[in-house]
Amino acid sequence: MPDGTAGQREWRVTGMDCGSCAAKLRGAVERLPGVTDVDVTLMTERLRLTLDEGKTKSEQVEKAVRGIGFGIAPMGERPETPKDGFVLPDGAFPGAEVMPEPEGEDAARPADALPRSWYRTSKARLVIGTGALLAMAWASRLVFSAEIAQWAFVLATLIGLVPVAQRAFAMARAGMPFTIEMLMTIAASGALVIGEAEEAALVVFLFAMGEFLEGISAGKARNSIRALSNLVPKTARLELGGKTREVSARTLKVGQIVKVRPGDRVPCDGEVIDGTSGVDESPVTGESVPSLKEPGAQVFAGSINAEALLRVRVTKAADDNTIARILRLVEEAESARAPTERFIDRFSRVYMPCVVGAALLVAVIPPLAFGLAWDEWVYRALALLLIGCPCALVISVPASIASALSTGARNGLLMKGGAVIEAAASTTHVAFDKTGTLTHGRPRVTDVSVLGGREEDLIALAAGVESGASHPLGQAICAEADRRGIDAAVATGGRALPGKGAEASIDGATVCVGSPRFAAERGALTRDLRDFVAPLEAEGKTVVIVLYEDKALGLIALRDEPRADAAEAVMQLHALGIASVMLTGDNPRTAKAIADTLGIVHRADLMPEDKVAAIRNLSREARVMMIGDGINDAPALAAAHVGVAMGSGTDVALETADAAILRNRVTDVAGKIRLARATMSNIRQNIAIALGLKAVFLVTTVLGITGLWIAILADTGATVLVTLNALRLLAFRPSGATSRALRTGHDGSDMRHTPATP
């Protein structure tokens, strides 16, 4: 890119273990001239920003990142080991090292998927190194004199503190003086000055141990997300020119044919064109029961063919398949930070200087004002510094969010970030689209009535207009023509009429297939025709009228049955204290027939703009989640507090929505809310742990009851407890009907009352 132009850059950054690490990285690079739109994602270890090369070069960004102790490499290249640890003899101290070149199967794996042994990390080396030095210092006290042992503890402290101090001063130079590394450096150095070398060495070791455990916890959450990318096989059996050859799955193109043998993973999103087999979709959707796949059925990349050979036509490129989409949504989710997380970030920026000021007052005022011992009050002030570090508080929200995103992805429940999780947890009303959401979205033709002529001609005209349609009703009409062996009329200039129907030109005439209301607008809905329509709609059927130059030729009735779990989903939401409403463009009679079956309130005859108005009216007094799957649902999804797209929906709906349900189970709506509520409960627990422990030890430290090593243990312990508590969400089962979340609200209160009617 030429100098003076701005463009987006992406790097892989290693060494980030918590939200505070991401904040440090963000702070280091956003101060550089020409750097804007900085986005750091912890789980995917990505740094993305807009860079004006005329003001700052890419190399300067990389230098700034390495300067604060992180490893950095352009996306797709081999990642670099972070430069922030005690390095054992097989590496330089404290320089960075590049991961060794992979061999065998690893050579074909992407750089960001390569595993690293725990003992090869810089933080593990810091633990091993400081632990060994501390042990040797203790041993010297048994063998040598107390004075020699004291110097051994001093040496252990200084050697262990060097990498911490380097990072502290690097961050100070980058404009971030109030960091845990700086507090550690001040506290350990101060302890040495007042003669507490043994305690200083122990503090350095405990700090290293806490950092190491943070890294282990973050790695566990990160790996559970990365495992998704490994679901798609590296190779595919491509059928070409009557022969089969093995190719890279990433090179598959839309329209190509692949063979999937029993036991193989499906290498692409595609459509079965030959063969019948049970396919295990649990790796992708979490659905444990194998799904029967026949010609015409859709299959997901990463699912497992269990029984017989399938021939599959590729329908999505590798970068757009289900797994790739999940990973993109997870990445987007990390960028959408929860309001609680943003508040804590702002709070910590004020909190840290206040703690430093309070520690300074504790060190100075008692000796100066009351003549108390300097050593004792400086010691208490140093302990206060360590306790005051907000690491546990800063990590309390992102750790829970990361675990929730991982759990959701494994169970086919995607949410685009902490803000969505927080909004979903407070949901009071759920609005459902009908077709393709509460129903299968695959209606079939039940009745054909002609006002003159033959049924075959009517179906041919209707199928011609609906050729290539994405709407379920249009597809059902085309399917009925295929079933009867009727060739669709040749149509040109076809276009959809949102909320009304479709029209095209056939043999120079305008032919429309639309709702009775549309026919009425065109002046074609006569009294006799209305008498035909009424009894069909009373049976819950959807009626479309075929118009030839605005003259009715006949009508076609279709029916779409509710999903098997739709009624159960409404019951589960009711048990959660959430009211449900169905919003549909169908006629009132059809809507009532479906709504009565499900036990749900309904509003019918809604155009896309009417759905938006309904959502906005409802949102004035309630927190609304909208569930839909079609193009006409996209505006309503955007208008709701939380928009959720069904996984079988259109790309437009999926892109507009805040969340997605991959396995097309309506009960997953309740599961998504249960997961969101469990996450917010987990966040509140984490904040209570972080602030509670600090409050207790702040008091005991000022009173002289606890000292330095307890102080660092309190900070490290709180961070580890918060992280471990967040990891409990990895075992959460959103679909568990016996879960406590099903019986209680997100604040723990009983929610088994009758919900308000929307």
Image (tube, helix red, strand yellow):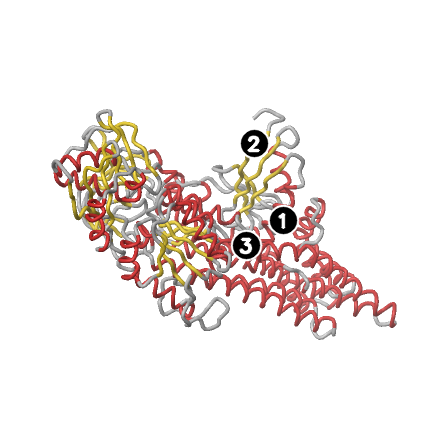
Cα–Cα span, label 3 and label 1:
18 Å
Q: Is residue 458 left or right of residue 719?
A: left
Cα–Cα span, label 2 and label 1:
23 Å
Question: Under tag 2, what secondary structure?
Answer: strand
Q: Could you say which is closer to the camera, residue 297 or residue 496?
A: 496
Residue 217 in view, yes or no: no
Disc 1 residue type? Lys
**Which numbered marker is on residue 138?**
none
- Whether residues under marks 3 and 1 lie with C-beta atoms below 8 angstroms apart, the answer is no
Question: Under tag 1, what secondary structure?
Answer: helix
Q: Could you say which is closer to the camera, residue 546 or residue 113?
A: 546
**Residue at 19% from the left image edge and 48% from the top image edge:** 532
The image quarter in which residue 189 lies? bottom right
Q: Earlier in the sequence, mark 3 or mark 1?
A: 1
- Location of mark 1 (residue): 24
Residue 710 on image: x %, y %: 65, 69
- Whether residues under marks 3 and 2 lie with C-beta atoms below 8 angstroms apart, the answer is no
Which quadrant does the C terminus fall into?
Answer: bottom left
Q: Is residue 19 left or right of residue 432?
A: right
Crowding at mark 1 (Cα within 10 Å: few <14, some 14-19, many 20+): some
Residue 751 in view, yes or no: yes
Residue 449 on image: x %, y %: 15, 43
- Whether residues under marks 2 and 1 lie with C-beta atoms below 8 angstroms apart, the answer is no
Disc 3 residue type? Ala
**Which numbered marker is on residue 338?**
3
- Location of mark 2 (residue): 7
**Residue at 62% from the left image edge and 30% from the top image edge:** 53
Disc 2 residue type? Gly
Residue 565 on image: x %, y %: 29, 60
Q: Earlier in the sequence, mark 2 or mark 1?
A: 2
